[in-house]
Amino acid sequence: MNNKNPAILSVQIIHGSLIMGVFTFLGVIFFLSQNNTPNTEIDISQTEMFAYISAAMLLIGIAVGQLLFVKMTGTKNNSFTADSADELNPIQLSKYTTAMIIRDALLEGPTLFSLVTLFLISGATGTIDTNLLPVQIILSNISVYFFLMLLYFPTEAKINKAFSEL
């Protein structure tokens, strides 16, 4: 029998569904990009700049997301200490959930922008050519997104820690 707190489980399901949305969109992009004929109407040099923009957006999203998460959970000025998730009150869990969704969305937006850029570049070249620098940047963005989402996966210990730091 699973003894997980239902409130913690719901936060984990929300986080996991955000990851699956990006993963599904990535699958669609790879499926649609296979065996295309190059579109000569799309200028590759015009779509390359979007790769650099998406990298900047991701860096800004990481910084702003983390700042908002810390500010919203009150990590720096909250003296709450809980030994287990059962002691978390609904207001604290609600704050954590809201802060997590905002942080995740600030990562997800630039990643989806990167995927659309990847689709545009693959349309111009006919395939996903990993030798192109913009494609490498985009794949790096996607890798960073998945790494951070796994790192930020909410566990009982992480939720307790968010409210126990001084």
Image: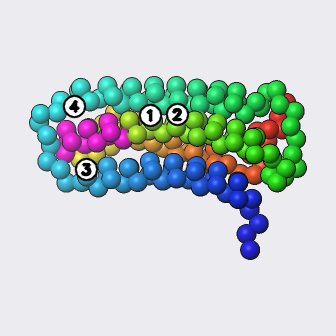
CA–CA distance in space, label 4 to label 3:
15 Å
Q: Which mark is residue 33?
A: 3
Q: Relative to the observer, which residue lies in front, 107 or 80?
A: 80
Return the residue at label 4. 44
CA–CA distance in space, label 3 to label 1:
20 Å
Q: How many other residues sit within 10 Å of disc 1, few (<14), some (14-19) or many (≥20)?
A: many
CA–CA distance in space, label 1 to label 2:
7 Å
Q: As drawn, is 111 to the left or to the right of 12?
A: left
Task: Specify start and end residues of the magenta stretch as a single range.
Answer: 114-126
Kindly check if marks 4 and 3 are in contact, taking CB atoms under 8 A apart as contact: no
Which corner quadrant of the image does residue 118 belong to?
A: top left
Which residue appears at 52% of the width and 53% of the height? 17
Q: How many other residues sit within 10 Å of disc 2, few (<14), some (14-19) or many (≥20)?
A: many
Q: Secondary structure at mark 1?
A: helix
Q: Is residue 124 magenta?
A: yes
Which residue appears at 11% of the width and 36% of the height? 40
Q: Which mark is residue 106?
A: 2
Q: Is residue 62 magenta?
A: no
